[in-house]
Image: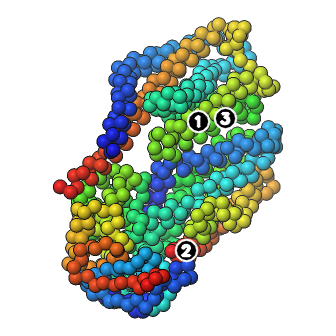
Amino acid sequence: MLALYIRDVKLGIRAGGGALVGVLFFLAVIAVAPFAIGPDANLLARIGPAMLWIGALLASLLGLDRLFQVDREDGSLDLLILGSSRHMLPLTVFVKCLAHWTASVLPLVVAAPVLGLLMNMSPLATFATALTLLAGTPAIVFIGAAGAAVAVSLPRGGLLVSVLVLPLVIPVLIFGVSASYAASTQPDPFLPPFLMLCALMLFFAVIGPLAAAVALKGASD
Amino acid sequence: MAETTISGRLTNLANPTRFLELVGRFLPWLAAIALLLTFAGLAMGFAAPEDYQQGSTVRIMYLHVPFAWISMFCYMLMAAAALGTLVWKHPLADVALKAAAPIGATFTALALATGSIWGRPMWGTWWVWDGRLTSVFVLFLMYLGILALTRALDDPQRSARAAAILTLVGVINIPIIKFSVEWWNTLHQPASVMRLDGPTIHPSLLWPLLVSAIGFTLIFFTLHLMAMRAEIWRRRVAVMRRMAAKRAENRAPA
Amino acid sequence: MRLTADNLGGERGGEPVFDGVSFALAAGDSLVITGQNGSGKSTLLRVVAGLLPVAAGTVRLNDGGEDFPDVASACHYLGHQNAMKPALTVAENLDFRRDFLGHPLMTTEAALDAVGLDSVGALPFGYLSTGQRRRIALAGLLVSFRPVWLLDEPSAGLDLASERRLTALMQGHLAEGGMLIAATHLPLGLDDAKALVMPGGGSG
């Protein structure tokens, strides 16, 4: 299992800088916002956490469709499924998700505080947002894995995966953004939405890989 | 067939061989002069009088202005290299472009960071979305885009053309950066060194600035030459690996 | 150990490709499947491996012991694709296979030596030619132990010397009590293999 994790992280970093493209997309989305909304610093600070969340959400959906498709194209998916008698397939999927998160999504979380600066957010709000991203983005990857598995045999699954997954991650977005706001606006407590976010992440960590494993078994041909 | 492609690759590298030789000889000198000038410039900067409005904060100018200058200079250099790739198909031109991108991105990031640190006490904010800052940020994004593109394609031949075209399209941003302070009302101060009617900055501040700018430019060249050398070596390693794979095939039946 | 298929049927995309296939393999037995294009050779292999659902009949592994309780756990499957990552080096690919599959058998060096490519371990897999890639995939069969080899056109892209080496590898596997099912349209040099001719697709 560790071998699979290391292999996938290596591939994520080596194969044409997939991680860099994700961060770049994140940067570009955030950079476009002030052009659309106007450079009003107060307004930007107010919508900052929401913008960061939307940017991170879209950027982490970006490479998700390739999660299993690459393995399917070169035949390694057969290897993973055939190995399922030793390593439970959901666990294999879980490890693949973790590797994908480490290589492609963790850089987004690291970049978030810098972008918070550009959105004129207060340090407290920035770090609260980064923290919620740290807790919330794995949920996106886990549930996205289910979408990627469903669409694995489709030739142009990319957009479809995003369409399938976006409605499912709305709860994550709700609690992530409300926790980020709660940290900076005084009367709202930070902890309840944040704990809900963590609970969602753990819930998806179970449901996502299970669903993905079932879909992968059915999709192999 | 296989022989011609390999020997063709080797003649392509013949020119870079001479380049490597020259770089090997001049690099230590260049590096020494660059460091000397930079330290001299920064030392002069610290000896220079403080600004009556900004106090000692103004000293970050001796870092910020060279960084910002190099971020644009590097892009122009990459654009020239892109022309070299597209028009003359010179093998070194693509190497120069590819090697410059990460350095340019770093200097742009440094320019943004030092500007941000300078802006905090002066304007009371780390960042504003005004013409100058935004256009430099776009430049930074373009550097990263070129970087991602050159890394994404494994085959140097194909990535060379793609990166060259992307670089040339992006050149439009450079005059926007240069004139952004005049076209839009912004917090960023207007040009004070490179003006048609001569610099408006006081000579006691100008000289350290010039010396450190030249020093940093030489540092940029040092880094660039080193990166080009590394890139040429990287490509040779790739060619040798492919040849090793072929040789394994030839030896196999024996 | 015994691998038996009884009246096995397979389908692809809801359409039956073959049915009524029966065979039994004991330790050291091999089965060579031949047949026209589209007669279901590949489908049969994937059904045996458990990568496709069984449409009719059964396929069973008896006396596999604790290590190999079912068919899938006892199989090496080599499909049309090599299941290797072009961006990783050959050695990284093989090491991953061994770590992931368990039951380590040969070192990476020994496996590469067995396919006559001992010098390519440090090269990225993507740098190799088609035939070399196939041979590395064959080396992947050697790094971890599985009693049953399911090979789909194993000699595709191989030159004469490599084909001979493949025959030697397969014979070695059989001599140690392994089992082997190969789908092919080229002779593999397995003299005492059982033959299974798939009833033709279409014209029959």
Near-viewer residue (A216 or A97): A216
Q: Position of residue A135 (x, y in %)?
A: 62, 59
Question: Which residue sits at x=59%, y=25%?
Answer: B76
- Spatial separation of the CA atoms under disc 2 and disc 3: 44 Å
The amino acid sitting under disc 2 is: Ala
- Spatial separation of the CA atoms under disc 3 and disc 1: 20 Å
Question: Along the horizontal axis of the image, is B152 left or right of B172?
Answer: left
Label 3 sits on residue: B137
**Which label number is shown at residue A219?**
2
Choose mark 2 or mark 1, whichever is in front.
1
Label 2, residues with CA under 10 Å away: few <14, some 14-19, many ≥20:
some
The amino acid sitting under disc 3 is: Phe
- Most distant residue in the left direction: B254
Question: Which residue sits at x=54%, y=50%?
Answer: A18
Is residue C138 visible in the rendered image? The answer is: yes
* Circles 3 and 1: CB atoms closer than 8 Å: no
Q: Are marks 3 and 1 on the same chain?
A: yes
Q: Do labels 2 and 1 share a chain?
A: no
* Secondary structure state at the residue bearing disc 2: helix
Q: Position of residue A22 (x, y in %)?
A: 60, 49
Question: Along the horizontal axis of the image, is B5 left or right of A122?
Answer: left
Q: Which corner quadrant holds the C terminus of chain B? A: bottom left
* Secondary structure state at the residue bearing disc 1: helix
**Chain bearing mark 2:** A
Question: Which residue sits at x=50%, y=71%?
Answer: A91
Label 1 sits on residue: B165
Q: Which corner quadrant holds the N terminus of chain B? A: top left
